[in-house]
Amino acid sequence: MAFLWNSQGPASPPGKTIRDLIEDRGMTQKEFATRMDLSEKHVSKLISGEVLLTTDVILRMISVIGKDVLFWSNLEAMYRAGLLRETMKDQVALDKRILSRVPLEELHELGWIALDENPAKQVELARQYFEVSTLQIIESEAMAPYTALGAHINREMDYTLLAWTQQAKFCARKMSARPLDHRKLERNLIKIRSLSLLPPKEFLPKLQAILAYCGVAFVVLPAMKKLHLEAITFFAEGRATIAFTSDGKNSETFWISLFKELAHILLRHVGPRMVYSKDAETQAKRLGLEKLLPSDRYKSFLALKRFDEEAILAFANEEKLHPSIIVNRLRSSNMLSKKELVHLTVDYELSRSDMKNP
């Protein structure tokens, strides 16, 4: 039976029809109860719609006041659907208030959700996107374990962030990532680092394969207007996921951000048993830089006191690391100005994980 959002009011309980039929026969409720072999109290509740019209009662009524199973079953189903419809209308009204906080237009532009002029249908589409029976559940404490993003992430309710990470979850589900294995991830960092020498079209599939082997899904999605982040790492649905925005990336920002996110995983800021830390971002940034370019190797390079392009390229080749990352480190150490060797930085165009392959 199709669900009609614009139906007017709940249907009458089958009890109204039962009452009319027994009155037509000149019966009292007491006599009807006796003939049905039911208590008067049960019959009273049956007529008022307080109890379900069961198959057992329907079969008794057919003998006492007529009609057939389909007739009574349909009356009961219509009545219960009407009650549910009224309840759902109340829930839709509450969900519509929350809906205004969801960036629906932008989600639609990205191709992630459909728009509908019918408010009730739009609420249902939003519920399906967030995979909840009502949008009110999203803000409940009971949902916290299922929307937990990581010990390093601000947990204040942000529907743009929630909508974006929900899309990241959808993409991660399609990837055959193994269970998270910190040891494998640690062992593969050098291999991951060497991918920085390749262009995005070549390194992205290899990076995704290596990380999936270590139990990490890697996702690239377009940024949203009110989403102020380069990347985010979270643990949900039994897997760790690193999600990157596709815009404004280059050979410096991408690899430095990636290793910071990997550091969050290694430091257990993300995972089934998260370790909370107030300075998690600082810790991850420090460890990420160390894993990307070990301090002992960097100090050996500094000791040579040669920071020209030729020396940097030679060191980058030796370390199997993109030269722009070394330039970034030299700038941070005030060994180079911001304008020096900028041509070594390469802009990246990252392919979206939410787009189907042509």
Image (cartoon, rainbow, N blue to C red):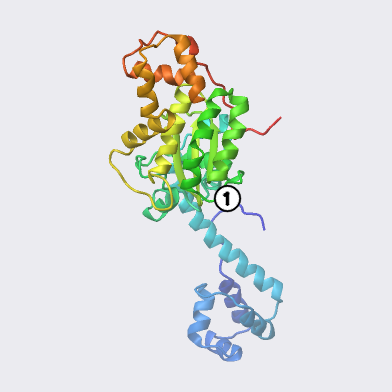
Quadrant of the rendering where the C terminus is positioned: top right
Can residue 250 be seen? Answer: no
- Across and down, in percent, residue 165 comes to 48, 40
Quadrant of the rendering where the N terminus is positioned: bottom right
The quarter holding residue 279 reads top left
Q: List the residue tagged with mark 1.
A: 5
Q: Nearer the viewer, residue 291 or 11?
A: 291
Question: Which residue is painted at 57% across and 30% down in the image?
Answer: 110
Vertical relation: 323 (above or below) 4: above
The quarter holding residue 308 reads top left
In this view, the residue farthest toward the left is: 278
Q: Nearer the viewer, residue 346 or 28?
A: 346
Describe residue 333's horizontal placement relative to residue 57 as left or right: left
Question: Which residue is painted at 53% across and 25% down in the image?
Answer: 196
- Across and down, in percent, residue 22 comes to 60, 81
Q: Amino acid at mark 1?
A: Trp
Can residue 285 be seen? Answer: yes
Q: Label 1's element?
A: loop
Vertical relation: 207 (above or below) 183: above
Q: Nearer the viewer, residue 282 or 181?
A: 181
Q: Nearer the viewer, residue 258 or 150?
A: 258
- Across and down, in percent, residue 220 comes to 54, 32
